[in-house]
């Protein structure tokens, strides 16, 4: 496999992976101001409340474990998901720019070789 083919495949993989990361991060409420609980949201009164969470609520993201998150912990976990959007967007951009550069480079005409001005290329002094 030629080096150019390997680079093109790697850049396409980067574009596809970045797109899935960015879209997946956006789909998980990454850029909303509200704090959402993926599991059961219990209010300060102990009753189940619908999302979005409010300060004082407790979130049980997984019903099989005893893990609980406060409002601030859930907001921090939700903000950590924003990293997927940033990383995915950067990977998508780098891959797309690389593919664009390779496309432009392949469509440009080849430059003629430049002459090296060595001893053979110059006229010797004194001779006409």
Image (cartoon, rainbow, N blue to C red):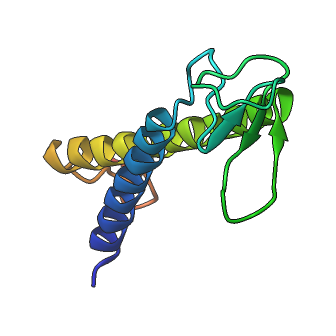
Q: Is residue 81 above or below residue 51?
A: below
- The residue depicted at 23 percent of the width and 41 percent of the height is 104
Looking at the figure, which quarter contains the N terminus? bottom left
- The residue depicted at 31 percent of the width and 49 percent of the height is 114
Q: Is residue 126 visible?
A: no
Q: Position of residue 16 (x, y in %)?
A: 34, 54
Q: Position of residue 2 (x, y in %)?
A: 28, 79
Observer-nearest of 45 and 114: 45
Observer-nearest of 48 and 104: 48
Q: Is residue 40 above or below residue 44?
A: below
- The residue depicted at 47 percent of the width and 33 percent of the height is 26
Q: Position of residue 49 (x, y in %)?
A: 63, 26
Q: Is residue 104 left or right of residue 22?
A: left
Q: Is residue 90 left or right of residue 115?
A: right
Observer-nearest of 52 and 102: 52
Which residue in the rendered view is the most extreme toward the bottom? 1
Q: Is residue 62 above or below residue 68?
A: below
Count of marks, rendered view: 0
Q: Is residue 127 visible?
A: yes
Q: Position of residue 8 (x, y in %)?
A: 30, 62
Observer-nearest of 87 and 107: 87
Looking at the figure, which quarter contains the C terminus? top left
Q: Is residue 50 left or right of residue 16?
A: right
Q: Is residue 120 left or right of residue 76?
A: left
Q: Quadrant of residue 67?
A: bottom right
- The residue depicted at 38 percent of the width and 39 percent of the height is 97
């Amino acid at each position: 496999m030629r080096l150019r083919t390997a680079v093109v495949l790697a850049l396409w993989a980067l574009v596809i992976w970045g797109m899935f990361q960015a879209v997946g991060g956006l789909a998980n409420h990454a850029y909303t101001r509200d704090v959402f609980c993926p599991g059961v949201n219990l209010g300060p009164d102990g009753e189940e409340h619908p999302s979005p969470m409010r300060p004082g609520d407790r979130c049980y993201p997984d019903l099989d474990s005893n893990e609980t998150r406060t409002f601030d912990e859930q907001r921090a976990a939700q903000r950590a998901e924003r990293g997927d959007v940033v990383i995915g967007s950067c990977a998508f951009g780098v891959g797309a720019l690389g593919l664009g550069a390779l496309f432009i480079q392949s469509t440009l005409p080849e430059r003629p070789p430049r002459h090296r001005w060595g001893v053979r290329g110059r006229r010797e002094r004194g001779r006409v």
